[in-house]
Image (cartoon, rainbow, N blue to C red):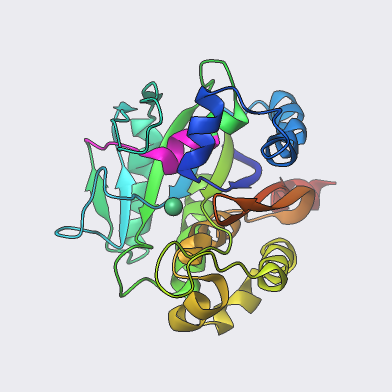
Amino acid sequence: MAKIIGGVASTHVPAIGKAIADRKQNDPYWKPFFSGFDYVHDWLAREKADVAVVFYNDHGLNFFLDKLPTFAVGAAKEYRNEDEGWGIPVSRAVAGDPDLSWHLINALVADEFDITVCQDMLVDHAVTIPLTLMWPGQAWPIRIVPVSINTVQHPLPSIARCLKLGRSVGRALESYPHDSRVLVIGTGGLSHQLDGERAGFINKAFDKLCMDAIVNDPDALTRYSIPELVELAGAQGVELLNWVAMRGALTGAVTQAHRNYHIPISNTAAATMVLDNQPMAQRRAA
Ligand SMILES: [Fe+2]
């Protein structure tokens, strides 16, 4: 059976891609952020994931405001990136895992999630930048199943709904009849606002509250409505929804293995987390 090995949460700011292209990882501005991935690299080398479920939000590359599903799941053999206009290089394609995709799709629909199924899907910087941060300078040694959550056009799904989505994915992963080692990734955030009177808004105290809750008590976050989340985390800080879904998919005993938090990266509170997931079946056997 598949094993959910853990979760990684990462910021996905486009400027990171430009910094990588310009080899600025050791510049004083960037080093505190990039060095936060040293632990992630060691953890990934040790854990050897076969496939990753990636919760992220599309920024207009695959979906636009004319057609923007609340939840979309990829079912393609590979996922291409294209020029998004951020001045960052176009990334290589990412391998898909259609068999796992359809397993998750069937489980989500059976669980009454009305998802959009994408057999052809572009993935933007919200997927490619975290993958590049996690496996720098090498071919990505994993397949992915991308799960897109609308964090762009209101009404957005609630925090509770995204937690349930993640938990449904987690249950489906537990029943996947292949010996895959599955990593769950959530990208985006943390607090930031790119426009309006509060442009540049960052809320360090709320970010810490969210990271603590992601580890120990994700249900505590469901008390916040989407308008409250916008107020506390910023208009684009709602990308926290991707982190919440990631956490929901970790169905075992979850512990924090690593956390890095750095302000700012391009007006964003940049955060990285690694969560270990000890499957319940293993815990019972121990
Ligand atoms: Fe974003």
Look at the picture and state if 263 lies above or below 200. Answer: above
Question: Is 78 in front, or is 235?
Answer: 235
In magenta segment, residue 67: no
Q: Residue 89 at what x, y percent from top left?
A: 39, 25
Q: Which residue corresponds to the image point at 68% horizontal and 35% vertical from the top-left? A: 34
Q: Quadrant of the N terminus?
A: top right
Is residue 172 toward the left or the right of residue 101 in the image? right
Residue 12 pos. (x, y %): 51, 45
Q: Nearer the viewer, residue 254 or 264?
A: 264
Q: Residue at x 20, y 60 (%)?
A: 65
User: Magenta span covers which residues?
Assistant: 120-130
Residue under the image location 50 percent in, 23 percent down: 21
Q: Residue furthest right?
A: 286
Judge whether residue 178 can be spotted in this image. no
Which image quarter: residue 156?
A: bottom left
Depth check: give the residue in front, 261 or 7.
261
Report x, y in % for residue 137.
Answer: 57, 17
Q: Which residue is at the far top?
A: 138
Nearest the camera: 28 or 282? 28
- When asked about the image quadrant of residue 110, the answer is bottom left
